[in-house]
Image: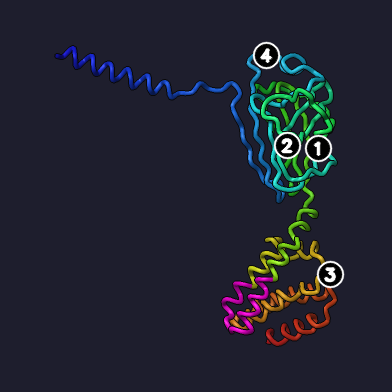
Amino acid sequence: MKNTILFALTLLFTTTLIGQISKLKNPKLSPFQKTEIKLGIVDVSLEYSRPSMRGRKIFGVLEPYDKIWRTGANKNTKIVFSDYVIIGDVEVAPGIYTIFTKPSMDIWDVYFHAEIDEYGVPETFDPKNSVVQLNVPVIKLDKELETLAITFDNLTANTAILSISWEKTKVEIPIKIPTDKILKNYLSEKNTALSREYSLAAYIYFDKEKNSKKALVAIEKSIEIEEKGMPFELWLENVNLEDRRLAYNYYLKSNILNDLDKKEQAIQSAKKSLIIAKKIKSEYYINSNTENIRKWSK
């Protein structure tokens, strides 16, 4: 009886152990890496697999010179831009791109390819399918880097370097964010139309329904949509000054705030409306805001 129980327990333990072992996955020789970063006001995502040297000579041997390389292992290296960027001196539209390279001893060719291929270099690699093709010099590293690394370095408010480093080799790809263009795109007709709908709602709440609290919520939403969260000065630099209604939102907001007995905020809003009014040369808003600021400052 004891032997039977012992056998059953041993069998149970062995079965459980085998089940646990079967769930273990073999470690990948080229682990997957995903990097998500914000460059200026653009979201960027990079996915690639990281092979290691493992005692092998890499460039010129494992990865021959003057031959297209997928720049990683397993699935092709993929980069995603949420908005426009400039790579080298080429403007690149938002989208998904695969990165191919052609290493040589002193210079690499780098391609941002429009065709999204899952594995390996396409049988017919046509550089015409690359939205960017640039040559970058090789930088020799002092120490060997065991595992391939693709990183974003030297970050500033609107620039970065995409670095590819492995073995004793490094190349750098300059990326710039065309902030002015992106900001102007934000000020699209669609956003302007939606902003005006909230502005109209604010006017109705304030002037017709005498509900200043709801009016304030609506006008602030209108301004938020119009300015896309930009600082006021930056928005004003990029906005279309031919729009004669630009001073209206802050003018209306100032009157709503004054009605809510928030004098200091009302004056601040009137001053913004006055700045805009002077930009667009609107005599009505210049005079109205100047008079309101004088009255409310007493």
**Mark 2 = which residue?**
97
Mark before the other along the chain sequence, 4 or 3: 4
Highlighted magenta segment, given as a residue range? 197-218
Q: Distance between the residues labelled 2 and 4?
A: 29 Å
**Residue farthest to the left?**
1
Q: Distance between the residues labelled 3 and 2?
A: 38 Å
Crowd class of label 4 (few under 14; some 14 to 19; many from 20; radius 10 Å): few
Residue 96 in picture, x, y percent from top left: 71, 39
Which of the colour schemes (rainbow, by chain, secondary structure, one colour) is used?
Answer: rainbow
Q: Are marks 3 and 2 in contact (CB under 8 Å)?
A: no
**Mark 4 = which residue?**
56
**Mark 1 = which residue?**
131
Residue 2 placement: quadrant: top left
Mark before the other along the chain sequence, 1 or 4: 4
- Along the line of sight, which residue is nearer the eye, 133 or 294? 133
**Mark 3 = which residue?**
242
Q: Are marks 2 and 1 in contact (CB under 8 Å)?
A: yes
Q: What residue type is labelled 4?
A: Arg
Q: Are marks 1 and 3 in contact (CB under 8 Å)?
A: no
Q: Distance between the residues labelled 1 and 4?
A: 33 Å
Residue 123 in picture, x, y percent from top left: 76, 22
Q: Which of marks 2 and 4 is in front?
A: 2
Mark before the other along the chain sequence, 1 or 3: 1
Label 3, secondary structure: give it: loop
Residue 75 placement: quadrant: top right
Residue 253 placement: quadrant: bottom right
Q: How far apart are marks 2 and 1 (CA)?
A: 9 Å
Q: Distance between the residues labelled 4 and 3?
A: 64 Å
